[in-house]
């Protein structure tokens, strides 16, 4: 997976991404991460990449030419036009399904806006996907890009030490992850559930699935509409909803 980040603040994204799991994966050659400074492509003698908006209004707008020129230079280098993701609160809200879709790409370009945004003509010319990390406004697209790159990278084979981790964490089958425990067995009077100490793998798997269903119902019931449940698990969910605790113990 090759990430190309078009940004005004390359140090910000590189310092954040070249650490921990993502940084180690890049060192191993499983990922490549480059930050392309949009300022390098301005023809304005003072290095400006923004100007006042036509029609008036507060703030400044990033000019189309430096953005497009930066992208076209990248295309010339790669010999193709890779998918361009624009970070904007106007886009689709990023989720695990989108991450899975993007993880199969060879190259992804993340376009990070600033100020009051980017000249619409640049967006129309190069952007393929409009994505958001939530219904709120940030000062720029760098943090959303880093969040998405972290999420997508976990799905790239070899990035996680245990590749199965990506399959059993939150949002697998549209369910939240079950509770996790480690030593000691008792902490502040709270015990690790007995089933996890039993060594009975089938019972542990059943308990974890039930805990995922219970937690999803409590914290993100909206996810259950598309959850992948067996007939028995669906019955368990209905019993949880009805509050019939005796039947599910």
Image: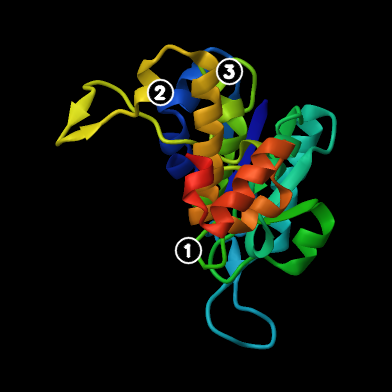
Left or right of residue 187, residue 245 in this image: right
What numbered label is drawn on residue 163? 3
Residue at image point 60% right, 72% down: 51
Outermost residue on the bottom side: it is 56
**Real-space Cα separation, disc 1 to disc 2, in angstroms:** 47 Å
- Give the mark nearest the N terminus, 2 or 3: 3
Residue 54 placement (x, y as % from top left): 69, 82
What numbered label is drawn on residue 42? none
In the figure, residue 81 lies in which quadrant? top right
Q: Give the residue at mark 2.
A: 195
Q: Give the residue at mark 1.
A: 139
**Would you say residue 181 is visible in this rendering?**
yes
- Give the mark nearest the N terminus, 1 or 2: 1
Residue 209 placement (x, y as % from top left): 56, 33
- Please tell me which residue lies in front, 163 or 122: 163
Residue at image point 57% right, 71% down: 116
Secondary structure, mark 1, is: loop
Residue at image point 80% right, 51% down: 128
Secondary structure, mark 3, is: loop
């Amino acid at each position: 997976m090759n990430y190309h980040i078009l940004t005004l603040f390359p140090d910000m994204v590189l310092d954040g991404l070249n650490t921990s799991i993502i940084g180690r994966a890049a060192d191993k050659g499983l990922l490549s991460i480059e930050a392309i400074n949009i300022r390098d492509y301005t023809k304005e003698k003072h290095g400006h990449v923004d100007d006042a908006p036509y029609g008036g209004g507060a703030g400044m707008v990033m000019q189309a030419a430096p953005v497009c020129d930066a992208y076209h230079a990248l295309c010339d280098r790669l010999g193709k036009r890779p998918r361009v993701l624009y970070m904007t609160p106007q886009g689709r809200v990023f989720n695990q399904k989108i991450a899975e879709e993007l993880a199969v790409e060879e190259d992804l370009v993340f376009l990070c806006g600033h100020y009051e945004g980017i000249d619409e003509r640049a967006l129309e010319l190069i952007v393929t996907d409009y994505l958001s990390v939530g219904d709120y406004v940030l000062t720029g697209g760098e943090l959303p890009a880093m969040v998405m790159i972290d999420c997508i990278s976990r799905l790239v084979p070899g990035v996680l030490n245990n590749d199965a981790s990506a399959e059993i964490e939150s949002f697998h089958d549209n369910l939240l992850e079950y509770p996790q425990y480690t030593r000691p067995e008792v902490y502040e009077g709270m015990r690790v559930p007995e089933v996890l100490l039993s060594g009975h793998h089938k019972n542990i798997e059943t308990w974890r699935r039930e805990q995922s269903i219970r937690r999803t119902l409590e914290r993100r019931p909206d996810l259950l509409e598309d959850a992948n449940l067996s007939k028995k698990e669906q019955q368990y969910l209905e019993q949880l909803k009805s509050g019939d605790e005796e039947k599910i113990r």
